[in-house]
Amino acid sequence: MSAHDRLTHLLELAGEGSQRTALVGELADLLLDWPCDCPDAMRAPVVALLEKTVRETDDDTRAKLAARLGGHGELPLELVNEFYLSAPRSVRREILMRNELAGEADDVAAEPDAALLVAAARDAKLGDFTERFGSAFAIAPCTAETILCDASGEALAVLCKGAHLDRAAFSAVALLKGAPAADTAARLCAFDMVPQHAAERLTRYWQIHHSPSEYRQTEAAE
């Protein structure tokens, strides 16, 4: 199939809402093995379409694609950040290192009140901590749930460190509301292992691209 035919096919898939999984897979195939007869000018729109579409696909598909990103430093940082929460440990480390080398985030991440957040985590009467947690960090409820359910604790460490919460606040939330972990000590050490600039950049990414307003728009579209 020629580059022109391939791009035409991708546009047809993009027009069919039921073909998201197929579209995401073919977009990833194209980016990870860019054809020599495909103009470089098409990379940017392909990246933008993949980044948008992957947010609308299922967890299984995201995880499979995330596992393929290792060693592909040519992919835009904004795109690989979208896969962080679905990526295996080795790919996560690559993503963190790329963010760290990229330096400080352009904007300051929203910083929740640590004392109020820990108090909410300790309140057994509070019905939905995930919603309160997401609101405190200015991220969508589904993203907040994914972060809290990460048994390694690294995603929570990234978010807390990126929003300038201290280790004590992270530890309290991890122990009270985090997913059960086989190695609690290792999970608590995750905070120290996360690079600061990387945490700030990823946290800001989630607040921009996984904000509560973005979540509401996606729900309305569905």
Image (cartoon, grey):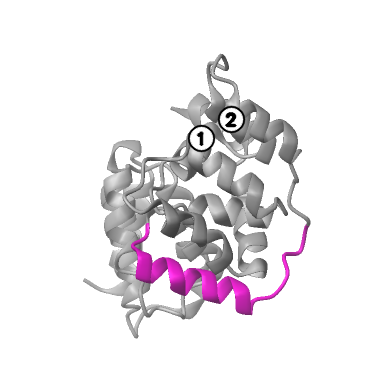
188 on left or right of 168: left
Q: Residue at x 48, y 57 (%)?
A: 154
Q: Principal SS element in the magenta part?
A: helix
Q: Residue at x 75, y 46 (%)?
A: 110
Q: Which residue is mark 1?
A: 176
Quick one: SS at disc 1?
A: helix
> In this orientation, does residue 93 appear?
yes
Q: Which residue is mark 2?
A: 121
Label 1 near label 2: C-beta < 8 Å? yes
Q: Quadrant of the C terminus?
A: top left
Q: Quadrant of the N terminus?
A: bottom left
Q: Which residues are magenta?
A: 87-107
Q: Nearer the viewer, residue 170 or 215?
A: 170
Q: Residue at x 56, y 54 (%)?
A: 157
Residue 193 pos. (x, y %): 53, 68
Q: Which mark is residue 114?
A: none
Query: Which one is earlier in the sequence, the residue at label 2 or at label 1?
Result: 2
Magenta stretch encompasses residue 146: no
Disc 2 crowd rating (10 Å Cα; few below 14, some 14-19, many 20+) is many
